[in-house]
Structures are given as C-alpha cells and as structure tokens.
Image (cartoon, grey):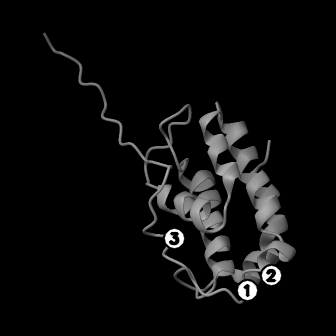
Amino acid sequence: MASWSAFAEFDGICDQYLPSRGEGDTMASQIVTAICKLVHKWFNDGDVYDNRYFMSGWRNDLSSYANWLFEYANLTELGEIETVKDDEEYSNLLFKIAKKYLDEDYLKQYEEEPRKGSIYEATGPFEFSEYEEDEEDDD
C-alpha cells in the first residue's frame, strides 16, 4: 500500500513547482497543486475526490481539483475511482497518479503554459455528495 511516506519521493518536484500560496501562474504549478491537494486531503482528513462509489470520504469537496486535472491535464486515470473499493486501492491510485504526473519530464511541457481556469472552480464528471445520516425513529 502506498503510504504517506511513499510520497516523499516527490518532495523535489513540490519544492520546484508548488507556489507559496494559491495555484500559481503556470499549468505546471496548477497540476502539482491539484495533485498535492488530493494526496494531502486523503492522508490528512480521509477525503476523496468523488465519494459516490465505494469510498466514503466525507469532509471536504475535492471534486474541483479532480475535474480541473481531468479537463486541462487529461488525467484520465482519475476515472478509476469508480472501481476503487478500499483505502489501499485509493492510496495506490493517488500514488500511480503522482508517479506519472509529478514527473519532471511531464511537467516541463507545462512550465511555460499560462494558468488555465481555476483548480478551485472546475466542474466535470467528479462529484462530492453530502450524505445525510439516517435519523432513527424514537417510536
């Protein structure tokens, strides 16, 4: 299982591309920011970018990050969330995405590309659904 410590291999990329705040001015910084948000929110809060399937991340709506990555960076692997059934599979999916896209060669092609849209306001196929707890009848 990919653990939080496994993501340490991406520290150099994050140091190079993560802006000190916001999403940055290039697509490369947006890609790194969005992926890091997905990874951090999973390991910090247990949140997932689409909780309509088997994973029940519930606290924060991360769908905008995934929708932006899907639309602008063509991260089609995000669609695998539909088949992820447990924490280990979700951690491994995030690691697979990080391994492929938090890569110097991949990001170089986006270093000079100006920011597109906003990772904070993207819509698309991924959704966050707030579950309402069942109320028990006191009858």
Pointer 3: what residue? 119
| Disc number for residue 111 | 1
Which residue is found at the position 57% from the left and 63% from the top? 71
Badge 3 amino acid: Ile
Q: Position of residue 114 (x, y in %)?
A: 61, 87
Q: Position of residue 123 (x, y in %)?
A: 44, 60
Neighbourhood count class around disc 3 (C-alpha, 10 Å): few under 14, some 14–19, many 20 upward:
many
Are dots 2 and 1 in contact, CB under 8 Å?
A: yes
Q: Position of residue 10 (x, y in %)?
A: 80, 69
Which residue is found at the position 18% from the left and 16% from the top? 137
Pointer 2: what residue? 108
130 or 8, nearer to the observer: 130
Which residue is found at the position 67% from the left and 61% from the top? 74
Specify the farthest residue to the left.
139
Task: Tell me the element at label 3.
Answer: loop
Choose the circle earlier in sequence order: 3 or 1.
Answer: 1
Q: Is residue 8 left or right of residue 41?
A: right
Neighbourhood count class around disc 2 (C-alpha, 10 Å): few under 14, some 14–19, many 20 upward:
few
Badge 1 amino acid: Glu
Q: CA distance from mark 3 to mark 1?
A: 16 Å
Q: Is residue 47 left or right of residue 130?
A: right
